[in-house]
Every structure is written in structure tokens, then in C-alpha cells.
Amino acid sequence: MLAPLALWTTHRWARATLYFWSFTLTLQAFIQPLLSHGPAHLQFWTFWAGHTIIMASAVYDVAVLGFRPQWRDIRPVLLVSLAYVAAVMPIDLVLGANYGFIGNPPPESSIPPLVEAMGPWPQRALILMALAVVGFMLALLPWRLARAGAALANERSAVHEPSA
């Protein structure tokens, strides 16, 4: 629901949330998909279609619409993320679900190995939230490096330009 909102309204907080969630959280779904059915089942295709649409929306926002994340975007993304956790965790706990891997699912449910390695609930949920923040910082890093490189290049060109 966030991707259409971000692209349609172009509100910075929504675009930043789309960017950071896509390049950290959604990316994890591509690296370690949690599927119980193969290509013969609709669940397989809805999983891949949904995650692909989210990632494609973020790539479109960066590549076509020119969104560039900045430090100032971290705070609203953290607030939206906390609101998401506050909304989803009670639902997970009541239903015995594990949406976003922040719930306390029954022992027989599947959890990706990386998530399972973080220990039992609630420890796992706290570690995942901390890792999400680290992931957001890492997703910002290429843009910070690009800005620093551009500033250095501008500084060097200004030093080498002849005075008028």
C-alpha cells in the first residue's frame, strides 16, 4: 500500500519509507524467500509478484523520478517503522502469526535461517528492529559517498580553473 502512495503523492516521508524498506526489508525476501509452495501454487506467484512490485516501485522512484535519500529521511522512516511494528505486533500475537518476523509464531512455523539464528521471541524481534536501523544506514551509504565524491570533484575543479 505504501508504494502507490509514495509514487502518487510524492510525499517525501512515503518515498523515503519506500526506499529504505525496499532496499533493506524487501531485499531480504529475495535473498531468503520463505515459500511453502512451488510454482504450481498461487501463493508462490503472489509472493514474487508482490515483492517485485515493491522493489520495482522503489527502483522507479530512484531511477526515473530522481528520489535521493538523505540523512533527514531517517527520522520519519524510523517513526513509520515504529508505527508499523506497533500495529502489526499485537495482530501477530493474537493470531499466532509472524508477519514481518516480529511475532511469536508456533514452533512448527517456518522462519528463514538468518532470522532463526537471532534467537527466540521477543529477543528476535528486538534484534530485527536494530538490524533494520543498521540496514537503513547502509542503504543511505551509497548516496552519502556519491555526494562526497561530487563535492570533492567540484572542489578540485574549482582549484584548477583559471581566475578571470
Image (cartoon, rainbow, N blue to C red):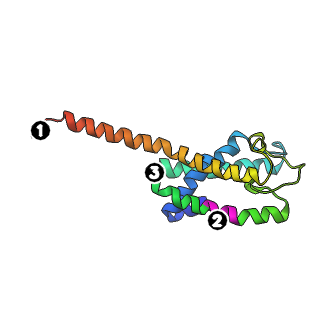
Q: In terms of secondary structure, where does tag 1 sit?
A: loop
Residue 7 in picture, x, y percent from top left: 53, 60
Q: Mark 1 points at which residue?
A: 163
In the picture, the quarter occupied by the C terminus is top left
Q: Do the residues labelled 2 and 3 touch (CB within 8 Å)?
A: no
Q: In terms of secondary structure, where does tag 2 sit?
A: helix
Q: What residue type is labelled 3?
A: Arg
Q: Sequence order check: which comes first, mark 1 or mark 2? A: 2
Q: Give the range drawn in magenta.
A: 81-86
Seen at 49% across and 49% down, the residue is 62
User: CA–CA distance between discs 3 and 1?
Assistant: 33 Å
In the picture, the quarter occupied by the N terminus is bottom right
Q: Residue 72 carries which label?
A: none
Residue 57 visible in the displayed image: no
Q: What residue type is labelled 1?
A: Ser
Q: Sequence order check: which comes first, mark 2 or mark 3? A: 3
Seen at 66% across and 53% down, the residue is 129
Q: Mark 3 points at which residue?
A: 68
Q: Give the side of residue 60 with respect to residue 51, left or right.
A: left
Q: What residue type is labelled 2?
A: Ala
User: CA–CA distance between discs 1 and 2?
Assistant: 54 Å
Q: Mark 2 points at which residue?
A: 83
